[in-house]
Image (cartoon, rainbow, N blue to C red):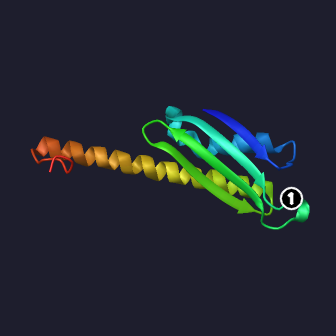
Amino acid sequence: MKWLLKAQGATYPATLPDHIERRLRFALARLGDRVERVIVLLQDNNGPKGGIDKECRILAKVQGCGAIMATVADSEWTAAVDRATTRIGHTLSRRIGRLRDRRIQTYRMSVAGVASPAAR
């Protein structure tokens, strides 16, 4: 998995990139080599004013699924990253599961001699 970190108007701790990589590997490990590329965008919307303004946006390009995005805003960088990586992992797992279920259903219909939903 290749990943890229971009920051727009955001100052973050020097340890955050290591934290992001660790969380991405944990959240996307079960997907194996299907994840082609991940872009993590950090944006501080209010600047130094504070508040729930630290936004973590993750865009994942997955083989067979296209691109999927998760966006989370929080008051702390690590919390935003943690929630966004968890969300992207769950979203990708659901999407891949749906694709797998659809393929199994289509295969069972073709074996049973029933026309597939796409052929109707």
> What is the x, y in percent for residue 25?
64, 40
Q: Residue at x 66, y 35 (%)?
A: 3
Using residue 113 as the reference point, say whether residue 69 is left or right of it.
Answer: right
Front residue (pair 4, 14)? 4
Front residue (pair 67, 17)? 67
Q: Residue at x 82, y 68 (%)?
A: 51
116, above or below 33, in the image: below
Using residue 65 as the reference point, say whether residue 42 is left or right of it.
Answer: right
Residue located farthest toward the left when viewing the structure as drawn:
113
Element type at mark 1: helix
Front residue (pair 7, 80)? 7
Determine which residue is flagged by label 1: 47
Front residue (pair 119, 106)? 119
> What is the x, y in percent for residue 83?
67, 57
Q: Residues within 10 Å of mark 1 (few under 14, many from 20)?
A: few
Q: Quadrant of the N terminus?
A: top right
- Name the quadrant containing residue 6: top right
- Name the quadrant containing residue 84: bottom right
Residue located farthest toward the right when viewing the structure as drawn:
48
Q: Residue at x 44, y 50 (%)?
A: 95
Q: Residue at x 44, y 42 (%)?
A: 65
Residue located farthest toward the bottom when viewing the structure as drawn:
51
Amino acid type, mark 1: Gly
Q: How many marks?
A: 1
80, above or below 32, in the image: below
- Name the quadrant containing residue 48: bottom right
Using residue 79 as the reference point, say whether residue 33 is left or right of it.
Answer: left
> What is the x, y in percent for residue 70?
60, 54
